[in-house]
Amino acid sequence: MYEKSALNLPSYPYKIRTEQGKKLIFDILRKKYVALTPEEWVRQHFVHLLVEHKGYPAGLLANEVQICLNGVKKRCDTVLYDRSLKARMIVEYKAPSVEITQAVFNQITRYNMVLHVDYLIVTNGISHYCCRIDYAGNSYAFLPHIPDFSEL
């Protein structure tokens, strides 16, 4: 199944189990098993990249963060907070089979209307895009790589 899906992300010792015929994967941030979907496969690998390879403190990351956008409840896939618990980054995941399009960026930009973060990341596990928002200059710039936590 997903174990064989090649991602452009480091492998890690993930934990998968089956309950009532459904595969579940352990989420280190939520500290529980969640449904193993193609998007979740990407999320767990990307969170592992952030924590184990990029130095992001797991305690400052949260999955499935609920926000209210124009009176509608939405969920950000992953949010990074700073030590004063201000949101700094939103990460949006798509399944590997989903192409990263302008519509995906529009989605994460709408979420940012609520959170006002400095960084937006969109990934399908194969292609990764990170941009830094410059609110003073009313602009944004795509970065050549996913920054280490120390670079933020």
Image: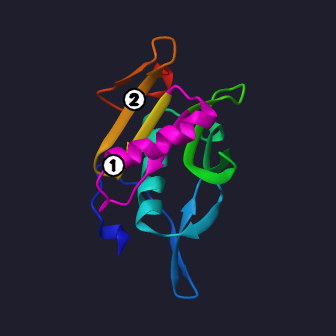
Part of the protein shown in magenta? 89-118
**Position of the N terminus by quadrant:** bottom left
- Counting residues from the start of the chain, the first of labels 1 and 2 encountered is 1
Q: In this figure, which residue is indicated by the disc labeled 1?
A: 9
Vertical relation: 138 (above or below) 41: above
Left or right relative to 71: residue 56: left
Q: Residue furthest bottom?
A: 20
Which structural element holds mark 2?
A: strand
The answer to which quarter of the image holds residue 57 is top right
- Image mark for residue 92: none
What distance separates the C-alpha of mark 1 from that of mark 2?
19 Å
Three-letter code, disc 1 = Leu
Residue at 49% over, 70% down: 36
Three-letter code, disc 2 = Cys
Q: Residue 95: where, in percent of width, then height?
A: 37, 60
Left or right relative to 112: residue 100: left
Vertical relation: 55 (above or below) 102: above
Q: In this figure, which residue is indicated by the disc labeled 2?
A: 131
Q: Residue furthest top?
A: 136
Residue at 50% over, 32% down: 55
